[in-house]
Image: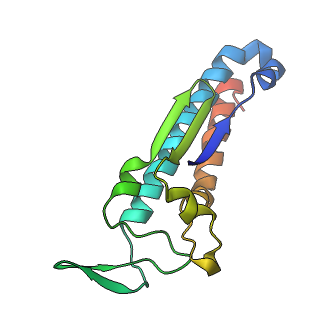
Amino acid sequence: MVELKFKWEAKDLELFQQNSAKFGQEIDDAIKKAAFIIRNTAIDKISHGSRKGRLYKRGAITHRASAVGEFPKTDTGRLVNSIRINHSFLTAEIGSDVYYASILETKEPLKGGRPWLEPTYELTKDKIESLFNTALKRTFGL
């Protein structure tokens, strides 16, 4: 399985004891929203966009693959349909249990890798940071 985890340690809430219940809920909401942003962006990047890989035919269907280093290009939809979020209080995991998901993610680009989760995080990290800043503002009125 390939996954990206967001987790807020309960011990960190001790720093904010006066507002811990509100802060915990705000952080949990931000974690949940961040997970959906990453999941939806990954699905969009895998499903859409131009690719520069080779053309090949499977039966009557012509498909253009992704080039090395690009987001993988959906073919059967299996990877896209397998991207899941597991959420519990203060924790979210985004990933896929499709066997080739981790191969695509971890194989070096020059050796055929087509990472999708880490690049998605990089594309969305400003939005995610904004979610956590908003959570702090809502809790402490900053």
Task: Find residue 4 and report its horizontal and vertical position in percent.
Answer: 61, 47
Residue at the far left: name it.
60
Q: Residue at x 80, y 26 (%)?
A: 12
Residue 22, image quadrant: top right
Q: Nearer the viewer, residue 99 or 138?
A: 99
Task: Find residue 141 and report its horizontal and vertical position in percent.
Answer: 69, 28
For this view, does 3 lie left or right of residue 98? right
Task: Find residue 9 and report its horizontal and vertical position in percent.
Answer: 75, 27
Quarter of the picture containing the C terminus is top right
Q: Residue at x 71, y 31 (%)?
A: 8
Please count the marks in the image. Answer: 0
Q: Residue at x 42, y 64 (%)?
A: 46
Q: Is residue 1 above or below residue 120?
A: above
Q: Residue at x 40, y 70 (%)?
A: 73
Residue 16, image quadrant: top right
Q: Is residue 32 above or below residue 140?
A: below
For this view, does 117 lie left or right of residue 6? left
